[in-house]
Image (cartoon, coloured by chain):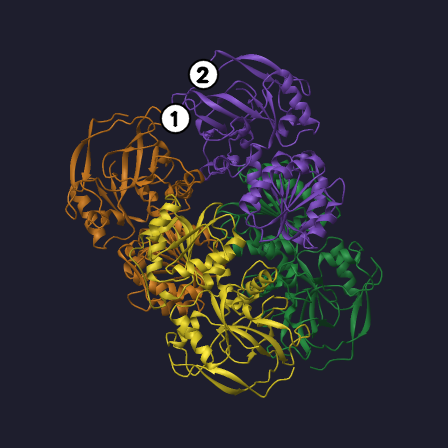
Chain colours: A orange, B yellow, C green, D purple
């Protein structure tokens, strides 16, 4: 593969200001490192948080962590089975040392774990070949970038509820953005025997999600009282599980009360990161329910996710609603639209 | 057994005012009901909450739910194996209909469940013989009343963590009152392979608990920063489980951060019943920990608890630090001292 | 209800000889007992075992334990909610004392448990009302008798595998008689995300089962090598779970080798009761698989089973292929046909 | 480190014949390979099986797989954190490709897994550095070789029972050789709340084991009926778990009947490798117990095992009863004595 000495990268230079594209030196991978030629990157809500300065990430920085690319150059300790030209999705919770968590595949809890940004450039240096999951055989490579974070996080969340539900129980999914739609699909994959209630405050998100995956009930929480709606739908039994992709005090306070005894509430969304308040601990105590945090998912999970996608078990293609090109104007529009809540599903920046 | 037509009962008549002892008609049990002659009752923190008017319980009412007594009269559908004169501990989460929860022993979640008060009188009418757990053979019957709630709640809490811990992991118990000391003992019974950290803000509670059960570490959270102390003790690894018998915003916010990844936080205490606030949801998400509510325990659990006590596996006797007689003065002193935080362990009112 | 002083009952008098119908005194229920007027009884393989003298059951005896009937007379300790005239399915693993198993719903392991026979008569005395599960609302009452054993046993077996399988895993069901067909349905209910392989040596059983429930693959083990067929179907991955309703040395030896690592083999069938031989323990050790015994199921499970049937979630009606009347000729034909392996699905004797 | 061009290796040349020591060329590690200078090797029962020709292993071969050594030479893809001179225990279930099992730490089920022999030589070529677990800090390095198989297998077996037992339950360990004694210790580590029954047919094995770890009961199965003894000890309740390091038809038939309902029987020993027979499947069905196979353990487990040993939590030193030198006479005596059942605990061949 012919590698240019310099390539273009998009930088956050000031919080909330437009990104700027500049030339940077293309690094040469050494040891276990791999240089990946970017195919596409997805834009995640956390990228907007960082851009807005809400995550106190030091600037300047190259944003984005949902990356699919092509192996361009290998360090000298990268083994044969990693081939030049193969496509790969990047597992961005990188770590430098194996430990008791990583050895059992719980890589997101590695003691030396750091979220690795820097996707928004033509070439990205991957710190170790083991963080690359082969993506050959996927039908739509540019649409596959969100498998590395959005689909993966939703996968972990659904795995946390799958042994907690009985046939015909109800499960509620709060927030039908990209992650929520992936979650609906994982529920269909892992526990098709339950009834799904999809909830959002945007009519267009409800409509969009139902074009990708049919669920049993949809609630527009801005138009009707969702707690009451759930009570009617479940005939007073409540839901056995909630997966909350908003994660605010409001959603937690509203939906934890819709649980049936011994239910589970999986918290995924970041809205409560500046504070989470419940009017009372009584519901938690009385129902003996649990609030279960969900992080981004593990590296073995990412292998599973890509495998489900490859076998046609996961519709990741239609989740991508916008494909922008890698130039300053389009990138900045993409960030702006996500920030303004105008995006349905997921959007990607395509390089190739 | 010779039953008096009338007997004495203690009433809450006004929130926060002294209890009053009055004569009431002794009821005659019918069908599956049983009349129990009270041996002793324990006073629970929730009795104080009710007394203070914080639980909006209608008045007048006869308080207390931790009851041990003797079978005095049986309804005509009570079978032979329930014998007149046998001693029994009352399971106070009574229900009127068997359902999918009760059939599997999860009685605290019965759809028709109601907490049954009325222990503070010489005779108490038990609505169904199945709520009585035989207590014959217990060494110290008057001290055994708290088995029915304090020991039982702590039992359920410890069972929730026991499969979540590895040998030599650390477990923190917050609040070393009656329940906390029972929890320390249950940890020694169920997971003796872990290290226990006992935490309280009262030096005398720390001292008292350590006379009953030796733990690995004690922290006085009013004298040192408990989060820092835990970090030192665990060499930065954190605790794998917290059992919180306070349950306030402050304890939750402080101790959830001391968890290691995938840890469990069992919430038992009622302090957060008027509101529970965390400065951020980030810890829950990042650690993928769970906050697990704990209610009072099940009827099968109560059988286990009494059995452990009978086999000498649980020191319930020394947990009882005060034995009051059933008269207005002593009862009111008991309530007052509990309310003022002066009580170590548990106190009982003895009738016989 | 008008109860006759005498009623007709069918007796085994000599092993292997025809059953004889005789008059017996209709008992009067006392205490918690209930007299049930028989609607229908199912004939189970174990009834044939007893009839043949293979289970050393003392004679004379009234066979059959799959019973549905109508409450005719109540003992004086039977509560109001058991109503005269209501229909009920009998849970035949009766016990006389509650213990640590029964309190948590594991009734089949009650220390005082005994299998209760005697269904083949017009009235049957039920030793305690708690062994009756209300059946009102079932569409086809005479066809519902097998819910009490065949559907229940299959239910327990499927519950043992449901948390052991991943989406798209293969599960094999060996023996597509009455229990096997119920198992196929329970798999569709509990783990619809797996692929099912149905296996029998009778072409007509394979055909019959596929009229009731569609599975992914069918193997006639008398026509092709089933191990090879499974290897082809699963592309060498093997099955994650086997449920074996034959339970012979041959089936165990054949199918345990088709498991993938950490697989589960649920043993239900009685064929190995006189001896079970494996050519080697190596497969068990190497795969770290488990052989899990399955007994008849619990009383709470029976409530679930009846509830699924009532909601139309279980097709128990078409499983019943023959409905005999209660007379000596038809009963004896029924036993003979079952013994000769001529029966598809399940057959019942109808009284009403 | 100064490496000799040739080194000495012990060969099986004919089944059952003495081993022969010969010179072989010392290999030069390439890529991820590591050359280990042997400190000591343990002799396992499976080595005797191979030697006797019972495992149809092709000859000639260099036996033994329990190896501790020192890193002598590194291939060019071995990273810095593997240091020349560090000590390491070899994980001998090597594999060539990562797959869905290895990524979650279930390395013993890797699709490309092969047991790697060849320990009985002065230098051994390790096919990948990841199969080496650092052993620095262990007090007695030559005694630590059996951590790589004997202690590891016992570890896996005990982990399989640890969530299946309640406080004060009984657990039986059959066969108190090296693995059995490790299992007793792991039980003390993981589930100290149970009562342990140790069983052997050799009085000296019972005596030896009790010098290393105190258990609640010891049974000499050649002197008394062990089933009866267990019934007396457990007052008819039976044991909740059996770990069987013999694994013959006789032990399985005897001890499976000593289980209580829902018990677990972990099969570890190889004696049933040529056939395993039970007189009846009835016990398995009736008790709904499970027979769980146990293989050698995983690579993450080996990290745990070494860590427990390093922290002084596992007495591996006194388990080693004989330390032979690496010469033909001593090696052949070691094999002979193990074959004749004369060995207590474990024996090692020491090279340094």
Q: Nearer the viewer, residue D297 or D283?
A: D297
Say if residue B116 shows up in the picture: yes
State the image coordinates of residue C58 (x, y, percent, origin top left). Answer: 81, 61
Q: Tell me the SS state at disc 1.
A: loop
Residue A102, placed above or below residue C28: above
Quadrant of the image containing the C terminus of chain A:
top left
State the image coordinates of residue A189 (x, y, percent, origin top left). Answer: 44, 50
Determine which residue is flagged by label 1. A79
Left or right: D125, with A258 as reference point: right
Say if residue A187 shows up in the picture: no
Q: Tell me the SS state at disc 2.
A: loop
Q: CA distance from mark 1 to mark 2?
A: 18 Å
Determine which residue is flagged by label 2. D28
Q: Nearer the viewer, residue D291 or D304?
A: D304
Left or right: A66, with D276 as reference point: left
State the image coordinates of residue A61 (x, y, percent, origin top left). Answer: 20, 40
State the image coordinates of residue B146 (x, y, percent, origin top left). Answer: 51, 68
Q: Quadrant of residue A306?
A: top left
Quadrant of the image containing the N terminus of chain A:
top left
């Amino acid at each position: 593969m012919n590698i240019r000495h310099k390539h273009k990268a998009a930088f956050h230079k000031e919080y909330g200001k437009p990104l700027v594209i500049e030339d940077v030196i293309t690094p040469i991978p050494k040891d276990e490192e791999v240089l990946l030629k970017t195919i596409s990157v997805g834009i995640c809500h956390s990228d907007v948080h960082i851009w807005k300065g809400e995550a106190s990430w030091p600037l300047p920085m190259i944003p984005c962590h949902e990356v699919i690319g092509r192996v361009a150059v290998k360090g000298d300790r990268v083994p044969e089975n990693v081939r030049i030209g193969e496509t790969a999705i990047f597992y961005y919770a990188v770590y430098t040392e194996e430990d008791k968590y990583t050895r059992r595949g719980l890589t997101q809890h590695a003691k030396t774990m750091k979220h690795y940004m820097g996707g928004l450039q033509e070439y990205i240096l991957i710190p170790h070949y083991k963080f690359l999951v082969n993506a050959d055989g996927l039908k739509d490579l540019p649409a596959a970038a969100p498998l590395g974070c959005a689909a993966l996080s939703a996968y972990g969340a659904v795995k946390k509820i799958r042994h907690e539900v009985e046939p015909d129980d109800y499960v509620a999914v709060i927030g039908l953005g990209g992650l929520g739609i992936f979650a609906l699909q994982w529920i269909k994959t892992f526990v098709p025997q339950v009834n799904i209630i999809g909830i959002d405050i945007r009519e267009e998100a409800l409509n969009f999600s139902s074009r990708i995956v049919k669920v049993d009930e949809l609630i527009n929480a801005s138009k009707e009282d969702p707690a009451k709606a759930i009570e009617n739908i479940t005939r007073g039994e409540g839901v056995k599980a909630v997966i909350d992709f908003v994660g605010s005090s409001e959603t937690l306070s509203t939906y934890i009360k819709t649980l049936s005894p011994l239910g589970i509430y999986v918290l995924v969304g970041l809205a409560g990161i500046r504070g989470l308040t419940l009017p009372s601990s009584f519901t938690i105590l009385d129902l003996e329910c649990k609030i279960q945090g969900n992080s981004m998912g593990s590296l073995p999970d990412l292998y599973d996710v890509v495998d489900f996608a490859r076998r046609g078990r996961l519709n990741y293609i239609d989740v991508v609603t916008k494909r922008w090109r890698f130039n300053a104007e389009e990138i900045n529009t993409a960030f702006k639209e996500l920030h303004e809540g105008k995006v349905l599903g997921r959007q990607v920046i395509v390089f190739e």
